[in-house]
């Protein structure tokens, strides 16, 4: 049997094994994406917060900035709805500003009050811009480069869900592929295909709530 034939057989067996696993895995199982990247930043109360401080908590991570006129208010509103619905002392949020020159701890504290944050586990974090960009790269959540241009304030509306052990987790899509990150945006349609700032639907926020509850129960 030549090497090419062996390679083809191995690939076929791998595909069959993957399909079998996807069909037979527990329906409520959440995919383990990776360990949460290490971070150490200053929050709105001038306290240093690290990934180690969040161990034992289920938490959501976003990148945003306080003067963002478009998706950030939507994401903040949707995360506040998560906070209100679940209201658990082991639930937390990490909001990392991508505009550290303007978003000082005092400004971040003011913003947290504006949106009505209740839990002491919601940390608005800042650091130097290089550290923030490096962290977004490690999360694989898009943040525009070069803070001196408009592009530098572009960012993704994705949210990372972290479990009590410090693992990023996600559900699987209906096609059996890990979702990886959750959308914090609103949509015109229930399926979440057409983003809209004023949209009435936010299906992945509902997924996020369900999956947070699963992780809190672990």
Image: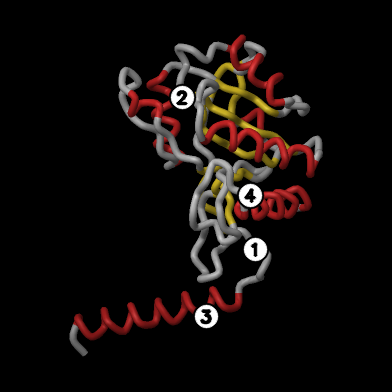
Q: Which residue is mark 3?
A: 20
**For marks 2 and 4 on the same chain, the one whose residue lies earlier in the sequence:** 2
Name the mark nearer the viewer: 3 or 2.
2
> Tag 1, which secondary structure?
loop
Is 163 on the left-hand or right-hand side of 63?
Answer: right
* Residue at the image position 75 percent from the left and 48 percent from the top: 216
Q: Which residue is mark 4?
A: 200
Name the mark nearer the viewer: 1 or 4.
4
* Residue at the image position 54 percent from the left and 47 percent from the top: 183
**For marks 3 and 1 on the same chain, the one whose residue lies earlier in the sequence:** 3
Mark-to-mark CA distance, 1 and 4: 29 Å
Mark-to-mark CA distance, 3 and 1: 15 Å
Residue found at the far bottom of this picture:
1
Q: Residues within 10 Å of mark 3 (few under 14, many from 20)?
A: few
**For marks 3 and 2 on the same chain, the one whose residue lies earlier in the sequence:** 3
- Given residues 58 and 142, the one toward you in this image is 142
Residue 29 numbered tag: 1
Q: Which residue is mark 2?
A: 98
Name the mark nearer the viewer: 3 or 4.
4
- Residue 70: x, y in percent? 50, 33
Mark-to-mark CA distance, 3 and 2: 42 Å
Q: Residues within 10 Å of mark 2 (few under 14, many from 20)?
A: many
> Tag 2, which secondary structure?
loop
Q: Residues within 10 Å of mark 4 (few under 14, many from 20)?
A: few
Mark-to-mark CA distance, 2 and 4: 27 Å
- Given residues 64 and 6, the one toward you in this image is 64
* Residue at the image position 68 percent from the left and 65 percent from the top: 28
- Given residues 31 and 203, the one toward you in this image is 203
Is 68 on the left-hand or right-hand side of 142?
Answer: right
């Amino acid at each position: 049997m030549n090497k090419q034939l062996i390679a083809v057989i191995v690939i076929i067996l791998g595909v069959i094994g993957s399909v079998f696993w996807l069909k037979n895995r527990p329906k409520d199982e959440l995919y383990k994406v990776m360990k949460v990247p290490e971070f150490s930043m200053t929050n709105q109360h001038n306290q240093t917060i690290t990934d180690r401080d969040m161990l034992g908590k289920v938490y959501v991570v976003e990148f945003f900035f306080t003067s963002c006129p478009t998706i950030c208010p939507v994401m903040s509103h949707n995360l506040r709805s998560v906070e209100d619905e679940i209201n658990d002392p082991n639930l937390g949020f990490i909001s990392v500003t991508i505009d550290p020159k303007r978003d000082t701890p005092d400004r971040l504290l003011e913003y947290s009050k504006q949106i009505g944050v209740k839990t002491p586990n919601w940390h608005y974090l800042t650091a130097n811009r290089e550290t923030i960009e490096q962290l977004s790269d490690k999360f694989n959540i898009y943040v525009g480069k070069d803070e001196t241009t408009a592009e530098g304030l572009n960012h993704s509306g994705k949210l990372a869900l972290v479990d009590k052990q410090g693992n990023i987790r996600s559900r699987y899509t209906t096609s059996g592929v890990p979702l990886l990150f959750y959308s914090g945006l609103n949509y015109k349609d229930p399926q979440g295909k057409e983003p809209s700032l004023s949209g009435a639907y936010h299906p992945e926020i509902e997924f996020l709530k369900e999956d947070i509850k699963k992780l809190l129960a672990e």
